[in-house]
Image (cartoon, helix red, strand yellow):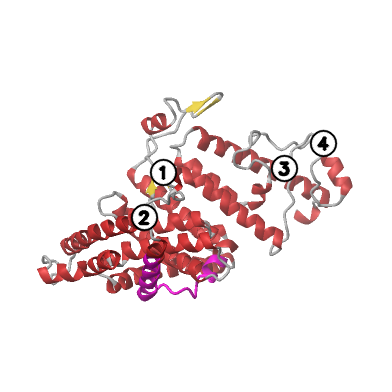
Amino acid sequence: LASAVSSADRSRLARLWEAAWEDACAAVRACARMCPGYHKAHYRAAWAALKHPSSARQKGFFGAENENEPIALTEEEFDAADADGAGDVAGPSSGSATRLETPVPGSDDAAELERAAVREARKTLQALFKVPAAAKAGAGGAAAAPAPPKFAVNMLEIDDGALTSRCGGVRGAGSFKLLNVGMNESGRKYVAATRRATRLFLALSFAAGDLEGLRALVAAPAHIRDERRRFARSMPDLGALALAYAARAVAAALEDPSRDLGTAEEASALAYWLWVEHGVVNGGAEGWDEAAAEAREEARLEFSFVDENSAASKTRGDERETAALADAPPNLIGRPFAEAFAASAAADTSAAAFAAHAKAYVEAVAEKGDVHALLTLYQDAGKRAAEASRRLKARRARSLEPSLSKAPSAAELEAVSAPARALRDALRG
């Protein structure tokens, strides 16, 4: 049947499919825009941008005034396109929306298209997360006080109450309404949705390779693995994965000789907070190495889905499993993720390297003569000593090993808080 279809008919079918796809994407984006709490719409809009990157080339894919305007496909346009060339998609005609031309895989245009899709997908998912922004200057133009970046998962279970409260009292606006969202979302589905969206957002931040992504990656592990929050039990593996991404991305940024001064300074600050949060409060080098080993294993497992997807595409298997592999973030994002992963493969993420990065940051702050920043870091280091003792007690209380379930001794508490006190002494000196 395929061989019997003419080239002109195939061209028309391709443009019809593209028009239907754009209309469907516009509907999903409308759901996300009108109901910020409808996390399914945000995820699916991001998924669509990555699944069919050529969509992102259309002007206004996320946010133009006419983003819901369908692609105009009339018989006259079909005939004009067929006359211009067999199978090629014509450029925009007068008064019509832009039609897209699929770039050759592997070309520079295709690479830029994929990078643009990463940026747009991350922008769409940001509504589901509280992401750290760049530090703002203080009063009189003074530098802002140093502080660790913040991150939070901002997703609610889908039900009438949540959607109404997040949409200003109504489930829609203007002529758009969500008439029925079905049954309230179960706890199991909510956990699955938060894991799926968080996993993709972390991978997009890593693939983007910019400072915005670095801030989110550095802040995410502490939030996700914080025992005081509800996500600590539902996605601790994603906390480890975020740490792997953060360590590789920050180390690669600091080792990049082509980086600009602003990037180097902020990456140095992020390396400091990464070391403080996952090294200092966990007892120093030993605690960092333990967390880093778990993180590397999660990263290895995540990237292994690339090989599994390649093998599944060559054999007939369970369609649901094949679809799940294709939607794994490394495969869904594609080349931008693979390039970021390869570029950071040789980055030094050891405890010694990050301890050195932290020391260099403190020295840089001292060299500037920023007394206020040094005082802020000194006070934070004092709090970290108490936090290190608290974390050790919490780990012992949760341990299933009889030898590790007993309360830590005074000597053990002294040892685990020693790195924080040493950091405080260095800042005082």
Quick one: label 4, few (<14), some, or many (20+) residues within 10 Å?
Answer: few
Query: Which secondary structure lies at badge 4?
Result: loop
The residue that label 2 is drawn on is 148
Circle 3/circle 1 CB separation < 8 Å: no
Discs 4, 1 touching: Cβ within 8 Å? no
| The disc label shown at residue 16, or none | 3
The three-letter amino acid code for the residue at tag 3 is Leu
Q: Indicate which label's residue lies in the foreground, 1 or 2.
A: 1
Q: Which label belongs to residue 94?
A: 4
Image quadrant assignment for residue 220: bottom left
Name the quadrant containing residue 242: bottom left
Task: Indicate the amino acid at tag 4.
Answer: Ser
Looking at the rendered structure, the secondary structure element under dot 2 is loop
Q: Read off the residue under disc 1.
A: 139
Q: CA distance from mark 2 to mark 4?
A: 52 Å
State which region is magenta: 339-363
Q: CA distance from mark 3 to mark 1?
A: 56 Å
Q: SS class of the residue under badge 1?
A: helix
- One can see residue 10 in this view: yes
Q: Nearer the viewer, mark 2 or mark 4?
A: 2
Q: Please say whether residue 359 is one of the residues in the magenta stretch.
A: yes
Q: Are marks 3 and 4 in contact (CB under 8 Å)?
A: no
* Mark nearer the N terminus (1 vs 2): 1
